[in-house]
Image: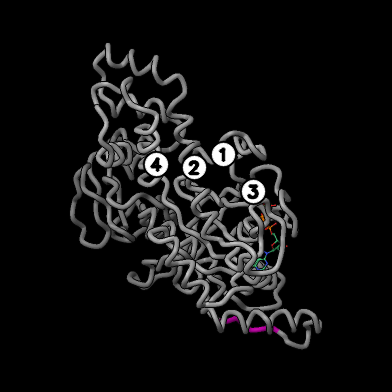
């Protein structure tokens, strides 16, 4: 699965992306620093089941640190979007196209209100970040509507002649947009369109449908960034104003400094933590010492830099992803090479176990017989919904 980091120019998207991936997407205090999309891998925290076995795990795809697994998730950093992006303004077409496969969006805003819609910096409070949450939604809806509407009338008439189901018709039009069939059905339930005659739908009905598709298929969470230049009170106001879209205060710059300092061995810091300690305070330059003191004051106010939480809230709460640990031996929780709980995967909550088998390997899905729960040792049928942190053996025909 993939999360798109989106928002207007110069709000800190690349800084947040770099903090989460420790990559080097260009960052600078002016708009359109990022000129093409960058992809990277971030990680989400989940308690490792290895403590239940009393044996350490042998991590493959997801590192384990002090009993916490770091489960990989793909991120994409796109250039800033401006009002009119869906019509191609600021190369918006091209950038939106990069987001087709994204399952959800982390929208970064400058919560201090110090960035214009075009990304020009000014004093905090000059702009209202509520506005960009509204116009970005309008842009995303127009983008989906544009894809939906391409050559709409002709293909609508042809499905009417064939008598095909409207869900299938929409599914075909939206391929490539990573919109699952359940989200299409959910969106259709929210609108009153004549299901048998899509060619009769008005432009407004189609736009409503695009809006519902966005809401059901592409959940969004707003990162209220540059929290260091805002106040908890202002942040509360922003949170109330953009509800029901959730808000997480972030300070991407501080998170990036801490992660880089941790990589350089200057501090001990675990992303998401409230605190950090300097490994050897004597080794820090006065400037480094001052920067860390500043960050200490900041996390005192906000609880943490908020960056790790923002991504986790989006993926776990909004996107409803859960983590599965596939194994080959349900007794010892090992794979064929004897590695304990080697891999951890994200899947949508409620995914049937056969679908999990497909995700591990196509052969396992095709030859699926049953799954076995590693904790209860109960056999689970193909349609059984997998649970969060399930340890699962897939039994398949050889
Ligand atoms: N005060 C403050 N500044 C930040 C924070 N995060 C990022 N910045 C600064 O904001 C400026 C823009 O950061 P970028 O990460 O390049 O922003 P962007 O949204 O990717 O910008 P474009 O690629 O041009 O759209 C840089 O000078 C960052 O250092 C933060 O949490 N607090
Ligand atoms: Mg950028």
Q: CA distance from mark 4 to mark 1?
A: 16 Å
Say whether residue 324 is visible. Answer: no
The residue at which mark 3 appears reads as 80
Q: Main secondary structure of the magenta part?
A: loop
Front: mark 1 or 2: 2
The residue at which mark 2 appears reads as 140
Q: CA distance from mark 2 to mark 3?
A: 13 Å
The residue depicted at 25 percent of the width and 56 percent of the height is: 373
Q: Is residue 86 above or below residue 233?
A: above
The residue at which mark 4 appears reads as 211
Residues shaded magenta: 275-279
Figure quadrant of the C terminus: top left
Please tell me which of labels 2 and 3 falls first in the chain: 3
The residue depicted at 63 percent of the width and 53 percent of the height is: 117
Please tell me which of labels 1 and 3 falls first in the chain: 3
Please tell me which of labels 3 and 4 falls first in the chain: 3
Q: Is residue 258 left or right of residue 238?
A: right
Please tell me which of labels 4 and 2 falls first in the chain: 2
Q: Is residue 348 above or below residue 251?
A: above
| Numbered circle sitting on residue 5 | none
| Residue at the extreme bottom | 282
Front: mark 4 or 1: 4
Give the structural element (helix, strand or loop) at label 2.
helix
Look at the numbered discs 4 and 2 and tell me whether their residues touch, using CB distance below 8 Å: no
The residue at which mark 1 appears reads as 96
Percent x, y of residue 387: 28, 57
Q: CA distance from mark 4 to mark 2?
A: 8 Å
Look at the numbered discs 3 and 4 and tell me whether their residues touch, using CB distance below 8 Å: no
């Amino acid at each position: 699965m993939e999360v798109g980091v989106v928002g207007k120019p110069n709000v800190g998207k690349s800084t947040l992306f770099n903090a989460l991936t420790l990559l080097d997407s260009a960052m600078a205090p002016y708009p359109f620093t990022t000129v093409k999309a960058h992809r990277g891998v971030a990680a989400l925290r989940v308690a490792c089941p290895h403590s239940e076995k009393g044996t350490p795990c042998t991590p493959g795809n997801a590192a384990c640190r002090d009993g916490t697994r770091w489960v990989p998730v793909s991120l994409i950093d796109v250039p800033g979007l401006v009002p009119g992006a869906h019509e191609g303004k600021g190369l918006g077409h091209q950038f939106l196209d990069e987001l087709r496969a994204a399952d959800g969006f982390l929208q970064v805003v400058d919560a201090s209100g110090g960035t214009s819609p075009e990304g020009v910096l000014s004093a905090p409070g000059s702009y209202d970040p509520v506005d960009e949450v509204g116009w970005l939604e309008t842009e995303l809806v127009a983008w989906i509507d544009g894809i939906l509407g391409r050559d709409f009338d002709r293909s609508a008439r042809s499905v009417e002649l064939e008598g095909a189901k409207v869900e299938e018709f929409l599914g075909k039009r939206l391929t490539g947009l990573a919109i699952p069939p359940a989200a299409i059905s959910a969106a259709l339930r929210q609108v009153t369109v004549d299901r048998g005659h899509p060619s009769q739908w008005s432009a407004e009905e189609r736009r409503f449908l695009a809006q519902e598709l966005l809401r059901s298929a592409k959940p969004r969470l707003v990162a209220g960034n540059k929290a260091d230049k805002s106040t908890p009170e202002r942040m509360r106001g922003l949170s109330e104003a953009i509800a029901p879209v959730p808000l997480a205060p972030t300070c991407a710059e501080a998170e990036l400094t801490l992660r880089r300092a941790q990589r350089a061995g200057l501090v001990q810091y675990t992303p998401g933590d409230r605190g950090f300690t300097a490994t050897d305070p004597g080794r820090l330059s006065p400037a480094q010492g001052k920067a860390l003191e500043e960050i200490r004051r900041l996390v005192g106010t906000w609880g943490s830099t908020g960056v790790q939480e923002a991504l986790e809230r989006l993926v776990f709460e909004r996107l409803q992803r859960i983590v599965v640990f596939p194994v080959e031996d349900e007794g010892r929780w090992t794979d064929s090479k004897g590695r304990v709980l080697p891999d951890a995967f994200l899947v949508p909550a409620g995914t049937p176990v056969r679908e999990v088998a497909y995700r591990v390997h196509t052969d396992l899905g095709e030859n699926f017989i049953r799954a076995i729960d590693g904790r209860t040792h109960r056999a689970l049928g193909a349609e059984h919904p997998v649970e969060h942190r399930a340890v699962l053996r897939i039994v398949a025909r050889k």
